[in-house]
Image (spheres, rainbow, N blue to C red):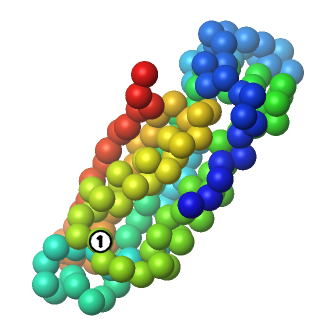
Amino acid sequence: MLASPVSPKVSPTGGSGGSRTETGLTEEGQDVILIEGLLVPAEIGILDSEKGRTQSVCFDVEIRTVPGYRKIFQETGAYVSYADTVEFVQNKAASGGHTDMVEDWAEAVAGFVLTNPLADQVTVKVTKLDIFDDAAGVGIRICRKRSA
């Protein structure tokens, strides 16, 4: 598993939002880091017809950062790396092995993302693209939040 580039001195609470950025704008709420349309070949599915072969799987990931994320980055250099998440998904697919459920993939990605203390919540969508001719894809979307 990849190490997230986070300074061990970073507090995941990051302050109370509403801080001013270097551009003079006010930071409100939480930023969302996006990974959209990440396509990987994967062995996935519970049907006999899905075992022993790969199929196209699409991943969409939204990572909500902790409040004050920009300020934390400016002060410490710590950040949430979308590249680490992309690499995690690609390595999991490349390592082979069959996964029965898209839910298992989604949970694995969510768990990886939330190892970074600057990630507060993650939404993961996993879509199998090759299942039905009449549907663009089938899958699941999960949302997981860091435990309090």
Query: Is residue 44 in view from this perspective?
Result: yes
Going by the numbered disc 1, the residue's amino acid type is Thr
Q: Residue at x 30, y 59 (%)?
A: 104
Residue where numbered disc 1 is placed:
99
Q: How many marks?
A: 1
Name the residue at the left extreme.
Answer: 48
Q: Nearer the viewer, residue 53 or 38?
A: 53
Q: Nearer the viewer, residue 57 or 47?
A: 47
Q: Where does residue 11 sit, x and y in percent of width and height? A: 67, 23
- Whether 14 is drawn above or below 97: the answer is above
Q: Where does residue 77 sit, x and y in percent of width and height? A: 82, 36
Q: Where does residue 143 sit, x and y in percent of width and height? A: 35, 39
Name the residue at the bottom extreme.
Answer: 52
- Whether 135 is drawn above or below 18: the answer is below
- Whether 44 is drawn above or below 86: the answer is below
Q: Is residue 35 left or right of residue 43?
A: right
Residue 144, picture quadrant: top left
Query: Is residue 23 in view from this perspective?
Result: no
Q: Is residue 59 left or right of residue 7?
A: left
Q: Residue at x 24, y 64 (%)?
A: 101
Q: Where does residue 98 sit, x and y in percent of width and height? A: 31, 78
Q: Is residue 133 left or right of residue 144?
A: left
Which part of the image, by quadrant, shows the C terminus? top left
Q: Residue at x 41, y 65 (%)?
A: 58
Which part of the image, by quadrant, shows the N terminus? bottom right
Q: Is residue 106 left or right of residue 117?
A: left
Instruction: Give neighbour class at mark 1: few <14, some 14-19, many 20+ (Cα, 10 Å).
Output: some
